[in-house]
Image (tube, rainbow, N blue to C red):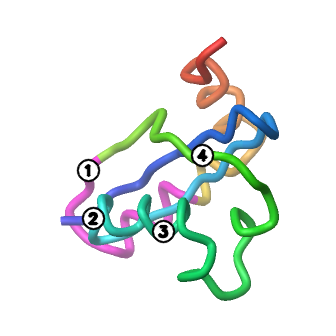
Amino acid sequence: MFFVYAIYNKARDKVYIGQTENLDRRIQEHNNPDNLRHTYTRRFAGEWVLIYKEVVEDRSVAVKREKQLKSYKGRQFIKKYIPR
């Protein structure tokens, strides 16, 4: 089981979309930049909160769905989950 997810940083008004096998661990990594190497979320101070997730059966499906959500239409879909 894999997760495709979107997290939001209100302090910087940024969204990150990714996929992982362990969602809880991955969100903790995003919020502890010392654990991250060269990642997008490390560049932005502030808390990253989960705003959207999907459960999929395997990594290949997760990667495909992640790419869809990173497209223009996918980002428009995710925008409605951003807390205002």
Q: Amino acid at mark 2?
A: Phe
Q: Which mark is residue 68?
A: none
Residues tagged 2 and 1 counted as in contact (Cβ below 8 A): yes
Q: Amino acid at mark 4?
A: Glu
Q: Position of residue 23 (x, y in %)?
A: 32, 60
Q: Give the magenta range.
A: 55-66
> Where on the picture, by quarter, is residue 80?
top right
Q: Position of residue 56 (x, y in %)?
A: 26, 56
Q: Mark 1 or mark 4, which is nearer the start of the sequence?
A: 4
Q: How far apart are the two marked residues, 3 and 4, measured between alpha carbons?
A: 25 Å
Residues tagged 4 and 1 counted as in contact (Cβ below 8 A): no
Q: Which mark is residue 55?
A: 1
Residues tagged 3 and 1 counted as in contact (Cβ below 8 A): no
Q: Tag 4, which secondary structure?
A: loop
The residue drawn where x is 33% and y is 68% is: 25
Q: Amino acid at mark 3?
A: Val
| For residue 38, side relative to residue 28 (left or right) | right
| Image vertical order of residue 77 relative to residue 2, above or below | above
| Image vertical order of residue 14 relative to residue 10, above or below | below
Q: Which mark is residue 47?
A: 4
Mark 2 closeness class: few <14, some 14–19, many ≥20 residues within 10 Å: some
The residue drawn where x is 50% and y is 40% is: 49
